[in-house]
Amino acid sequence: MDVNSVKLVSFLLTCLFLMNVVFTTTNASSFNDSYVDINVVPYEYFTYPEMTEVLLELEKNYSNIMSLTSIGMTYEGRDIWLVKLSDNVEEEEDEPGVLLMGAHHGNEKPSFEVVIFFIQYMVENYGKENTDNDEDGQINEDPIDGDDNDNDGLIDEDPSEGRVREVIDNTQIFLIPMVNPDGVEANTRKNRAPNYGVDLNRNYGYKWYFPYVLPEQYHLEWLLEETSQIYRGEKPFSENETSAVKNFVETHNIGISLSYHDYGEWMIFPWMHTSMHVPHESLFRSIGYNISRINNYDLRIYGQYGTQEYIIPRFCGAPGSSENWLYGEHEIIAYTVELCKYRAPRDITQVLDACWKHVGVNLYICERSLTVENEKEDVLESINYPTIFNFL
Ligand SMILES: [Ca+2]
Ligand SMILES: [Ca+2]
Ligand SMILES: [Ca+2]
Ligand SMILES: [Ca+2]
Ligand SMILES: [Zn+2]
């Protein structure tokens, strides 16, 4: 598919989706998951070459607010693309930074789809005047927040174009839609490093030794086994993809970050190697609950410092994950978002539901990034871990 047909398809899909929003009073729960309509064409996710073509085209058309650079090269020779959205896009300005990432795991296709959708939405709406999108005589009466704010039975049908302008003018949004393009093309969770590939979301170097402390709970055996799906690699940041992300983060100012995965419709935040609370627990919860109000996903919180639970390892903990390093090393308020009910759904309504909701989520975290540095100072909680747990 060439760029124009990709864009046409994406436009048609957007129309389909908006029709769904506008002409039904549906919410996610009214969709019957077990129903498969064989007349509906299955959703086609972007391939890496298609994405590359679309990003190049968008950069050409919106070069005033969008830049596209490669932050590294994969084993199979693909560029790892970084998109920046901001006014004065070529300059590094004194504006809050947000980092959105998709496809640490190549087989989790919605995770890059929502990021590409968001990029398109932002650049295409930036120059628009406030519009009465549903032609009901009112302007911008129903923002993307999952609620029917104007009580007309339709959800999020007339969002504010002004929000897009505000966010692009006042923040710097960095997006890496495919951290693991080789995995996307091969449809594998891990990257394509010799011999069996590495789970990039176990390769970040924060508390690398930790699985040795609780080997059973954190599946040390699988982390070290090359053939396992969570093989973490020989050493921290051994992989091109993770070291590209590392170099980027170390040279930019990022306040909040979301890493998209799928599936399950839930979200988590650090710590990932222990169920103890982070020093910014209340800030993480505040932002997390607000995201949850938009996407209706479950915010998973573990650990109650001050009770017996602090010695319990985190259920499904993931030492070596990106958000643990982003927060632990750089104090970035970082979440993992598990999109959709299934791995790579082929149903258009499900995919576009995730895309649309996360336009709202992404706009929200960009807006919240304007205050997050001050908030970090306000809510810092001093946590006195018992000395016996100093290694945590
Ligand atoms: Ca309207
Ligand atoms: Ca509008
Ligand atoms: Ca409405
Ligand atoms: Ca709304
Ligand atoms: Zn994943």
Image (spheres, grey):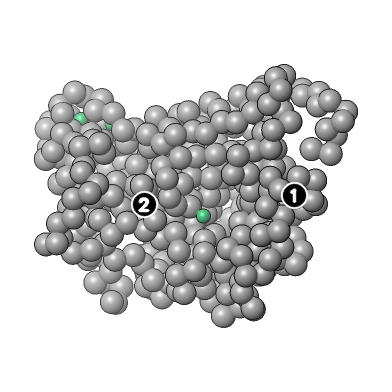
Q: Is residue 127 visible?
A: no
Q: Nearer the viewer, residue 221 or 201?
A: 221
Give residue 179's position: percent from left, percent from top.
54, 63
Quarter residue 248 falls in? bottom right
Tell me what residue is drawn at x 67 percent, y 52 percent.
Answer: 219
Give residue 380's position: percent from left, percent from top.
70, 25
Q: Nearer the viewer, residue 230 or 155?
A: 230
C-beta proximity under 8 Å, tags 1 and 2: no
Q: Give the answer, above or below, for where 263 lies relative to 151.
A: below
Q: Is residue 218 visible?
A: yes
Q: Name the side, left or right, on which 329 lies relative to 173.
A: right
Give residue 158's position: percent from left, percent from top.
23, 36
Tell me what residue is drawn at x 76 percent, y 64 percent.
Answer: 235
Q: Amino acid at mark 1?
A: Pro
Q: Earlier in the sequence, mark 1 or mark 2?
A: 1
Q: Give the answer, above or below, for where 362 lies relative to 77.
A: above
Residue 35 tag number: none
Tell me what residue is drawn at x 28 percent, y 77 percent.
Answer: 1
Q: Which residue is mark 2?
A: 342
Q: Residues within 10 Å of mark 2 (few under 14, many from 20)?
A: some
Where ligand 4 lies, by image quadrant?
Answer: top left
Dividing the image into 4 quarters, which one contains the C terminus?
A: top right
Q: Amino acid at mark 2?
A: Tyr
Residue 215 tag number: 1
Give residue 98's position: percent from left, percent from top.
55, 45
Tell me what residue is drawn at x 15 percent, y 34 percent.
Answer: 25
